[in-house]
Amino acid sequence: MKKFNPSVLALSISSLLLTSTLTFGQIQQQDKALFGVKEHQESLLFHQSLVKQGSDNVPIWRIPSLLRTKDGVLIAAADKRWQHRGDWGDIDTAIRISHDDGKTWGNITTILDLPSQNTEHSPVMNTSTNPWGDKDNVIRQRIRDPNYSSQYMNSAFLIDAQMVQDKRNGRVFLAVDMFPESAGFFHLNGAFNNPGKDGSGRLTIDGKQYLKLIYQDKQWTLREDGSVFDELNRKTQYKVIVKGDPNKNFKDLGDVYNENNENIGNIYLTNRKGSKNEKAPFYIPTTSYLWMTYSDDNGKTWSSPIDISAQIKKDWMRFLGTGPGVGIQTKNGNLIFPVYYTNQNNVQSTALIISKDGGKSWELGQSPNDKRIELNGMNSHNLRWDSWYANTAKQKGFELTEAQLVELENGELKLFMRNQTGKVMMSTSKDGGYTWVNTEKINELDHGYSQLSVIKYSKRINGKEYIVFSGQSRSGQGGDNLRRDGKLFLGEVQESGEIKWDTTNLVREIVSQGKAAGQPNGYVYSSMAELGDGSIGLAYENTTDYTTIMYLPIEMQEFFWKAGKIFSDVRQKEPLVFTYDGTETLEKIGDGIAIKRGEGESQSGINVSEGLLVLDQQTKDGKNKAFTQLTLNNSGVAQVNSTQNIDRFVVNNGATGYLQFTVTDTHSPRLKINQDVTAHGQIVAVQVNLQKKLKPNDKGYYHAQGEELIAFKDNGQVKWRLVNDELKDGMYVYTLASVAKPSVLRTTSQPHSLYLTNKLITADGKAVSTVSPLKAPLTVNARPQVNPVLASYLTANLALNKMSEQLQQSFMHETRLLQEKDRSIFVKYLNGKQKYGSNLSFIDYGYDFNASYSGVMLGGKVWQSERGNHALYTALNKTSYKVTPKAVDGETKAKYHSWGGSINWHSNLPHNLIVDLSAGYQKHKGDIEHAGHVKGYTFNIGADLGYRYQWMKNAFITPMVGLHYLYASLSDVNDQANKALLKYNNFNALKTNLGVDVNYRIGKFEVKGLLSYDMYQQKTRQLYVDDVAYKQGKLADTLHLNTQFVAHLTPRFAFSTEVGFQHARNKGQSSFAVGAHYQF
């Protein structure tokens, strides 16, 4: 709502005319497209022509309110003015909804409608008729005849919607001014028996406030349930609709019903004689009311509105209404709407209404006018028009009206207010809008006494808070001719809370198709919302004919380009592409991606302060230079695409950004720095996104091998480091190596190339120096560091074979305990530890490992010949074991499970000879930590020959010799976690063993001992990792010592314990088992 002085028609002339040739240094208007600026087309949001979209052919659309919900739904509200452009008449509240940030919109929907004395459709005023003049004529006629009626001023109406969302629960509140049949704001100026005395229109009874109903000369009241009470507080026969029907757009609100349930009128219309509402027994006072409705489904449906005037409007206020646009929710959860009001002297002041309980109740804060020193003791209550005020009020902004606000990160509220100084007025609250300090002009923002809009940008840009301001930019004290030349400005919030306005550069000018009092480029009321991609959605009136509300999305780069800034937001679906190759030094800001894609040699430099800058300069005439100087500031990152050239590279002190390369099979980026590299922190960080498999580096020392990333001149002052010191990709670990290159000239800055290559380490795990001179000494004991999981893969074959052998030996020990028994069974618990020492050197990736296992075995003698000379034994087992390689490359672990069985044919031959023919099969499955799965099987078959010699009555000694074949097969492993394909050679070995078995029994106790030595014949097998061959270690010749103690508790039941020890290559192995045997 818009109180302005229509007599003020003079055009304000600004001191500086900005034209399309405005420049910033060498940046000119014609460079706009080179900076990646994309200007979107605007579209009709509300207009009479949108009949198919639900405009109902209504001619006047005003007062946009634009809100984006937390679910990404855009809601636009507007005044749907059926009759004329005046701020009274038949006016509804309508909305449109978009689910794609304004690319498309749903139909226009009327959500609030009030009754009229007219027929179903109120008549449209002839455009040649001035509604303001008609209003003044009606006022004069009614002074003479209270029953005088005008079809253009005989409706209850709603005006100036504003919205806010409680983001905690998604509820959207819409506040709107409501007036009964009248001229609205302009009816409350004292011409009609000073109706402003009615304040909130309430009467207090027994401590409660009730809406007044004027019944003849008496004051009746309306209760919460719609009951009507007379002046003596007695209930009458009348009922009033207090909860409307949403299917009627709540137009039935205020309908009056008599004792016969007949609709006899509406309380929001007067009951003048001859009017449609003359049968209504009463009506509400003619004053302003503030109504509130809400939606819990992003604007699809709305609640029946309630009147909150009693909570906020004081008795001395003639008018209180919204500051149209949007409200805000503060960080502490409070909901806030800006409002303004008039006192009994008809002077306007701005304030806020605040809800601390999610919109259930509201309270009014103080006005900035309440404690302004320059008001000489006056405040919003008693501020008046007199000779002193008239001479000073306009230039000092004593009258404050429609407003919008933002909350800064420090908790301060900044309130921007319409006034008559020719500038925007701003006030600051440090307590959430209850009190105000520092009410002052913003001299940089010209203002022509019209509504304004302001929102706070949701994220910092280059470390700074920003607010976005929208308004017409003609300075003056009012008039339609000033409502043009719309501009959006960015205000940069300083650490002190002050706001810096660069109106020359950080501006987006609006070029509209509408007119303002015959002048081009109309721009009246507006409302903004930040869209999902970081752009600004703008809804604005483009003409003082007040017929049209437009919608325009504006990308943030449209603000920054004049200042030489390249802005991109990570929320944008596509990176910003710019091609500027001029002479100005640019700055990349915003957390998104920007791509430099010029041609040939650029003359500009750039500071990358935030987000990601991609160098993708195109070669022209054989020349390529992305920038003269590339500087990393703050968190800025620069990515190199293809081959790029720059003259100088600088990393400023405190910068946390880095150079970034993406290397693929088809894409090998390379940065050539022609002159010098300066790093004020002495370290340059590099990040590589490696999407190809590099050939492993040669052993020994760094040289020109791997992926060349950067060519530069090294003065010895800069150190290159990967972002995380090293890069682990697939099975390999990479680092950066600076390798000197031959040069014709001997200078202090030696040409070098920086390679991404395998990191070299020594046997103690220390890294080899990554700076390689022209003649690098050979570092013999160094090899490329690998992903430690490779150690688990390389030891898998050995671990499986050793476990299989342990199981087979344990089985054979049990069969010898059962040789003198008839058919019998046994159960055995196994537990032990193993240590392996590799035969391979560190250079050849030889890994020792430790293992532990536990399991259970169930078996027995399943057949025996009649004479007992021959017997068949079998057993099944289930075992789990853990293998931990000792790798200087890093920690790695593997867990295995095996299932299998063993069989043995035992024969006692003549001359005390014994023969054992045995076989075993185990199926294995292993999980390597942070890697893939290993699957395979092992198989062994062999024969043992022994001579049993009785040493004493109860003691036997059996020398033995054996020959066994061992085989293992592991399936190929597709390790997706480490992007590697591993292929194993089948493992086989021939084992020869010599040993002696000792047995001694006395009574119920028996002791058995075994001493043997195993010798292996085998070839070195290989594991192929992506076609790169790695040797696998061999089984070691081993000395075994094993002891069993058996207690024969009954003739049929025995209990045994077993302890074993093995020794090979200075490594030990221990085993322990307990068993129980039963003969049947």
Image (cartoon, rainbow, N blue to C red):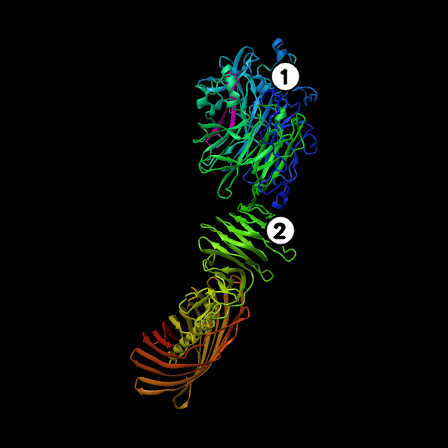
Provide the residue designation for mark 1.
Answer: 135
Amino acid at pointer 1: Lys
Q: Nearer the viewer, mark 1 or mark 2?
A: 2
Q: Nearer the viewer, residue 490 or 914?
A: 490
> Measured along the vertical axis of the image, is residue 448 above or below residue 460?
above
Pick the residue in front: 937 or 98. Answer: 98
Q: Is residue 372 left or right of residue 558?
A: left
**Image spot of residue 170 (x, y percent):** 52, 37
Whole-percent x and y of residue 769? 44, 65
Tell me if residue 627 is in the magenta stretch.
no
> How many residues crowd mark 1 within 10 Å: few (<14), some (14–19), many (20+)?
many
The answer to which image quadrant residue 131 occupies is top right
User: Where are the magenta residues, as a range?
Assistant: 338-359
Q: Position of residue 228 (x, y in %)?
A: 53, 17
Please tell me which residue is depicted at 62% across the width and 31% down the height of the picture: 485
Q: Nearer the viewer, residue 790 or 684?
A: 684
Check disc 2 and give the amino acid type. Answer: Gly
To which quarter of the image does residue 1010 belong? Answer: bottom left
- Residue extending farthest to the top is 144
Dot 1 or dot 2: first in sequence order is 1
Percent coordinates x, y for residue 549 in the rendering: 64, 31
Give the left or right position of residue 1057, taking residue 683 as reference.
Answer: left
The image's mark for residue 551 is: none
Residue topped by disc 2: 598
